[in-house]
């Protein structure tokens, strides 16, 4: 079993910054993908950014230039640096990891990010 533990959410004013962290622990052979999704009230969960073990990144257009994803493979940890936050970034942010060799997907419990205008 694999656990994903998130931290770093909170309340911030528009234009501010937050940094999310997610650490994976448990029975991990290797992690193919780690990343972040978010879900605002009344909306479907959407991709924010994901990063492969080799450092390849896929991110939503809405966060490009503002959010930066990074990963520490040795610590099985992924980070999301969020700058220039907007009220529309308000959502629950979920950590996601795809574990090899069976390509099993895991989710964190979610952390609330609230951006006030």
Image (spheres, rainbow, N blue to C red):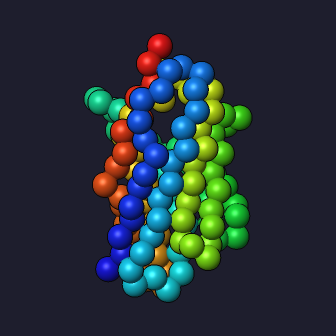
Q: Is residue 102 left or right of residue 110?
A: right
In terms of depth relative to the viewer, which is nearer, 25 or 45?
25
> Residue at the location (51% across, 48% down)?
20
List x then y, in percent, for residue 82: 59, 38
List x then y, in percent, for residue 39: 37, 39
Q: Is residue 59 left or right of residue 111?
A: right
> Residue at the location (66% across, 45% down)?
68
How many callouts does the rendering have? 0
> Residue at the location (41% across, 55% down)?
6
Q: Is residue 114 left or right of residue 58?
A: left
Q: Is residue 78 left or right of residue 37?
A: right
Which quadrant of the figure contains the N terminus?
bottom left
List x then y, in percent, for residue 11: 42, 29
Reply above or below: 105 against 51: below
Residue 39 can be seen, yes or no: no
Residue 67 can be seen, yes or no: yes
List x then y, in percent, for residue 50: 57, 55
């Amino acid at each position: 079993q694999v656990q994903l533990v998130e931290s770093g959410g909170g309340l911030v004013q528009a234009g501010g910054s937050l940094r999310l962290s997610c650490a994976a622990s448990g029975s991990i052979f290797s992690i193919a993908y780690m990343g972040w999704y978010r879900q605002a009230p009344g909306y479907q969960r959407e991709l924010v950014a994901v990063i492969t073990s080799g450092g390849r990144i896929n991110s939503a257009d809405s966060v490009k230039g503002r959010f930066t994803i990074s990963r520490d493979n040795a610590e099985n940890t992924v980070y999301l640096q969020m700058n220039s936050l907007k009220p529309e970034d308000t959502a629950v942010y979920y950590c996601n990891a795809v574990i090899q060799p069976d390509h099993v997907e895991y989710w964190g419990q979610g952390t609330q990010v609230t951006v006030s205008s």
